[in-house]
Image: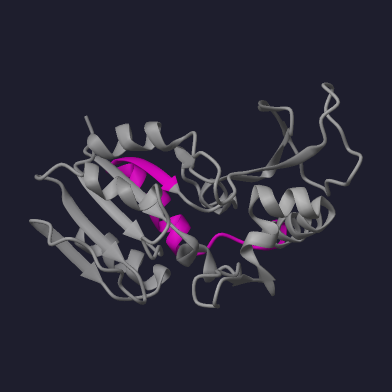
């Protein structure tokens, strides 16, 4: 049995692949107020704007490449049972080689009917107003917006509770319920936090903080494990 290594990643791990974060820009994401493009209210007010925004994000992700942090985590699968829990909607972990990835906030390459969140389809191109599912519902990005439930959180909690090693990379730990996952780390687990600007974390028994960008931080993690 390989030791269980669980990783929680945020926007910081994809930033070095050229995908913008919004945590450092006063709530603006690519020039948009995040609530205009990432909330049910924004969708009700201007669904066309929301679709255009995510169509642009989808193109950005298609053009981005995994970086050394993504591929470094995949390398750890040789020695560990690695489970990646990501707040990111991109597929860079999968393309970087990770075989078990749980997306807390949805996936940019999936879409669903507004009438049934279980009716999910793959999408590589644009979604447009008037594109409907078989049930007649307008298709929307399969993304968890602000104010919506996070259906994968219970599965994520179960993963964290079994972790022998827990690693946090590139997240401010300001977004809930994702940040609450740290409450489920076992006392005996080793904890590593990697970020160029370290978030405040509890004083865990076996805590190692690496104040570096994700690529340099994961490189250091590989030498420590």
At which x and y percent is residue 195? 35, 70
In this orientation, which residue lies closer to the viewer: 79 or 107?
107
At which x and y percent is residue 9? 41, 55
Residue 10 vertical placement versus 180 (above, below): below
**Is residue 169 rendered to the left or right of residue 119?**
left
* Residue 196 in magenta stretch: no
In this orientation, which residue lies closer to the viewer: 15 or 118?
118
Residue at 57%, 49% (x, y): give it.
95
Residue at 30%, 69% (x, y): give it.
199
At which x and y percent is residue 152? 46, 35
In this orientation, which residue lies closer to the viewer: 51 or 107?
51
Q: Quadrant of residue 192?
A: bottom left
* Residue 73 in magenta stretch: yes
At which x and y percent is residue 82? 34, 42
Q: How many marks?
A: 0
Over which residues does the magenta segment extend?
62-85
Residue at 17%, 60% (x, y): give it.
202
Q: Residue furthest right?
A: 130
**Is residue 136 rendered to the left or right of residue 212?**
right
């Amino acid at each position: 049995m390989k030791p269980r290594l669980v990783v929680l990643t945020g926007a910081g791990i994809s930033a070095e692949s050229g995908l913008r974060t919004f945590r450092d820009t006063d709530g603006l994401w690519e020039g948009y107020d995040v609530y205009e493009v990432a909330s049910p209210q924004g969708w009700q007010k201007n669904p066309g704007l929301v679709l255009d925004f995510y169509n642009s994000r989808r193109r950005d992700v298609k053009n981005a490449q995994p970086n050394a942090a993504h591929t470094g985590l995949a390398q750890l699968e040789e020695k560990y049972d690695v489970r990646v829990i990501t707040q990111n909607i991109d597929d860079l972990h999968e393309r970087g080689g990770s075989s078990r990835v749980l997306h807390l906030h949805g996936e940019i390459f999936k879409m669903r009917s507004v009438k049934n969140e279980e009716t999910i389809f793959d999408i590589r191109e644009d979604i447009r107003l008037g594109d409907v599912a078989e049930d007649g519902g307008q298709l929307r990005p399969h993304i968890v917006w602000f104010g919506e439930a996070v259906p994968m959180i219970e599965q994520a909690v179960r993963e964290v509770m079994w972790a022998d090693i827990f690693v946090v990379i590139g997240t401010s730990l300001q977004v809930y319920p994702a940040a609450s996952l740290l409450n489920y780390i076992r006392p005996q687990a080793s904890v590593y936090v990697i970020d160029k600007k370290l978030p405040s974390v509890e004083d865990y028994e076996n805590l190692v903080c690496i104040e570096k960008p994700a690529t340099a931080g994961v490189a250091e993690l590989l030498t420590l494990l």
